[in-house]
Image (spheres, grey):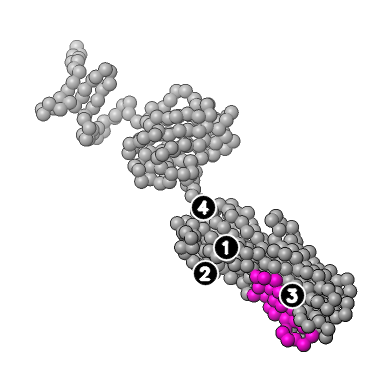
Amino acid sequence: MTSIIKVNTVQDVDGNNIINENSNTVTIGKSGDTVQVASGATFVGGGIEWQSSIVTASTITVVAGRGYWLDTSSNAITVTLPGTAAVGDRLIFTDYARNWATNAVTLNQGSLKFQGFASPNPVYDTNGQSVDIVYSGTTKGWIPNSDDDVTFETQQSYAVDYLVIAGGGSGGGEAGAGAGAGGYRTSTQTSNVGVTITVTVGDGGASVNSSNNGNSGSNSSVSGTGLTTITSTGGGYGGYYPQNGATGGSGGGGGGGSGTQGGAGNTPSTSPSQGNNGGNGILSGDRCGGGGGGAGAVGTNASTNTCGVGGAGTASSITGSSVTRAGGGGGGTNGTSTPNGGVGGSGGGGQGGDNNDTPSAQSGTVNTGSGGGGCGKSTPNSGAGGKGVIILSMADADYSGTTSGSPTVATGVSGKTVLTFTGTGSYTT
């Protein structure tokens, strides 16, 4: 015969409730107590309460302590997590129909953190995935106890501003044209934390003399996982008489001679344009070269006894103050009736030489990507192209401090950190 003793409350010797039934709710222990299950005993009925209904709606608000089957066969599902949580609160979500890769599950974390961050909302998109999360407290918030692919679901990112200028071309030989500036491109892109941005800075074209066209500048570029690669094209060389200028980021001018043509800028084409056309040369009186194109303006055509002027560069305030870079080179002359070579474009373009080499052709300013000036007589040489430059800027709070290639680093520039690269290097976000 079995005896059954029925009680509503069990108390300890101090009168504290150990077990209390009230309106069919049974409370074991009191706040602050430790409820211990004896070694070898089995606790029945505790843990996660799996829901019998399969979730197919596009949104659901969930309750801690439960497990949910999420079926995304027809649509993605956004799961709103509890607005408040206690340490140890647990939730499990499982891909019921193996369709999360087609229609993902987003966890709307609300005001509570997930993996230590307030945003972005984590997204799970792997077929057959099961996500088991536990609330750890206010510092880290919800943390996956397991999520199968162990992806960091709250990947952080921030915006980086870019200025990418290629190397300028060099001016042409005798009666040579000014060279084009290197391509000039700007961009703002969002990068995930931990991405390495590779930086390549193009050299300027080497100077020449006598019966030689100049040399085009080299490309500059930045690239990295998840980024749109930015490539700026080297500036086109200036022609000598009677040769045409070359295409490039900005085009080189045509050498002194009848009908010589400046090279096309913005080649290959980008939007916005990375540069401008070079000017035409002329043989009318003296041989005079055209001006090289600049980032902000075309190089001018030579006219009777007047050499072409280099196109103006473009100003940027990425370093905290306005600086003009990427000017085109001025055309040169070997005639006695032309008093001066063409002036270089603003932003570092080199001036063209005259018949007496006073002055001689000037090089484009280093690390502005400016074009060199065209040569006057066969000696000395034409102006070399200015080497390019790449500048990155991000909020001070985002700067990681991880670089290679020894860029110049300036912090606190109106709340920004500015990295200036004059050679190959990298930055890891």
Residue 62 in magenta stretch: no
Q: Which residue is under mark 2?
A: 408
Identity of the residue drawn at 53% across and 63% down: 320
Answer left or right for 181 relative to 282: left
Give the mark nearest the N terminus, 4 or 1: 4
How many numbered marks appear? 4
The residue where tag 1 is placed is 317
Q: Seen in the image, is 424 located left or right of residue 341?
A: left
- What amino acid type is highlighted by mark number 2? Thr
Above or below, 385 against 4 in this view is below
Tag 4: amino acid: Tyr
Which quadrant of the figure has residue 140?
A: top left
Q: Name the residue under label 4.
A: 158
Q: State which tag comes first along the sequence, 2 or 3.
A: 3
| Residue 310 vs residue 12, the one in the foreground | 310
Q: For the residues marked 1 and 3, what is the alpha-carbon distance in whole angstroms?
A: 26 Å
The dominant secondary structure in magenta is loop
Kind of residue sitting beneath label 3? Gly
Q: Do the residues labelled 4 and 2 touch (CB within 8 Å)?
A: no
Query: In this rendering, would 55 be left or right of 225?
Result: left
Q: In this view, does 295 lie above or below 255?
A: above
Residue 344, percent from left and from top: 71, 74
First in sequence, mark 1 or 3: give its number: 1
The residue positioned 68% from the left and 78% from the top of the image is: 363
Q: What stretch is highlighted in magenta?
A: 343-365
Q: In this rendering, does residue 294 appear at all? A: yes
Give the label, 4 or 3, closer to the camera: 3
| Nearer-N-terminus badge (2/1) | 1
Q: What element carries label 2?
A: strand
